Image (cartoon, rainbow, N blue to C red):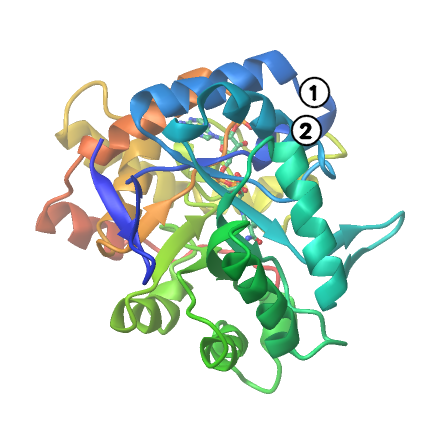
Amino acid sequence: MERRTIGAAALAVGAVGLGCMPMSWAYSASRQRGDESLRAVHRALDLGSSLLDTADMYGPFTNELLVGRALKERRSDAFVSTKVGLLVGDQHIVANGRPGYVKRACDASLRRLQTDVIDLYQLHRADPEVPVEETWGAMAELVRAGKVRALGLCAVGARSSRRGGARLHDATIRQLERVQQVFPVSAVQAELSVWSPEALETLLPWCESRGVGFLAAMPLGNGFLTGRLRPGAGFEADDLRARHPRFTAEMMAANQPIVAGLRRVARRHGPGVTPAQVALAWVLAQGRHVVPVPGTKQERWVTENASASALRLDSEDLREVAELPPAQGSWD
Ligand SMILES: NC(=O)c1ccc[n+]([C@@H]2O[C@H](COP(=O)([O-])OP(=O)(O)OC[C@H]3O[C@@H](n4cnc5c(N)ncnc54)[C@H](OP(=O)(O)O)[C@@H]3O)[C@@H](O)[C@H]2O)c1
């Protein structure tokens, strides 16, 4: 698989990573199957999809434990990317960016992941009660202590960032400018996909101009862009799409022209090419600093997604995707 480099620390990873979240969180988590997920992680590593993206809050904790089971056997094949700063409570998810907490959380992640070092440690969300420089300073100390190789920051959510007419990623860019004064940012993680291209406006250019890597979260539009979800089929209660405004039967039907466009492009590249692969190839085409982390718990999808690294979209393909109608339905 093609290799890409992340950030100032010059960390090399396979061009397509693996998002491990669906193995224990957000997508019908009640149907999780540990052994199948473990096979999916091994398949990813076999294919060169070395970047495994997890977080302590996925599960909570069980996702890191699962990834740790794979790492125990083959740490050197993997690039471990995890996150800190969000705690799952009974009713709410809360931020904790206190320096003492961050250091304890890192030690706990290292134990669960069965490793001595985390390749990329990301701040999941800044704590509104703690200056972000303080949290980032504690994370920088973890690099100096050899527990972490590089630092990343996740974009703040859509609903909390669009106040007073601000653009989607303005708040994230302000955070990035502040933490850069403390310690270099190696990667930014944010949603980027054919139906959520907002990061192309300011966030991606910000990263590119500063040599910062970009991890594209939700590159398959939470599964919609694969064309395998039927409008109206419904989702289990513990699946985030049961409450997602783009996944009502009406919105899924309204957004079908996007999938149809991906399918047209896929057909031009041969009979075995899928809309999911076109969606990932589109993300890969946005810059050499971009690494999509498609999420799945299934070995077959890992294999399909990894092959997208070999799919090159030409200018006609990119023009056709750019001319697709904008997605309907939004969290805002
Ligand atoms: N930093 C953040 O705040 C943040 C937020 C969200 C996500 N993330 C990261 O980004 C990763 C990716 O996002 P995501 O998992 O939410 O969304 P996604 O990658 O856009 O879509 C995941 C969904 O697509 C399905 N899928 C994957 N490949 C497929 C294929 N080739 N054909 C058919 N279906 C396929 C999966 O099915 P199965 O579940 O059946 O495998 C899963 O339901 C996450 O795993 C996580 O690591 C980060």
Some atom of ligand 1 lies within 8 Å of the CB belonging to the residue at label 2: yes
Asked if residue 242 shows in the view, the reply is yes
Q: In the rendered structure, which amino acid carries the disc numbered 2?
A: Ser
Residue drawn 76% across the image and 59% down it: 101
Quadrant for residue 220, please give it: top left
Residue 31's mark?
1
Q: Position of residue 287 (x, y in %)?
A: 23, 56
Which secondary structure, mark 2?
loop
Residue drawn 75% across the image and 63% down it: 100
- From the viewer's perspective, tell me whether residue 307 is left or right of residue 236: left
- From the viewer's perspective, tell me whether residue 184 is left or right of residue 13: right
Asked if residue 234 shows in the view, the reply is no
- From the viewer's perspective, tell me whether residue 191 is left or right of residue 124: left
Q: Position of residue 75 (x, y in %)?
A: 45, 28
Q: Position of residue 107 (x, y in %)?
A: 68, 46
Which secondary structure, mark 1?
helix
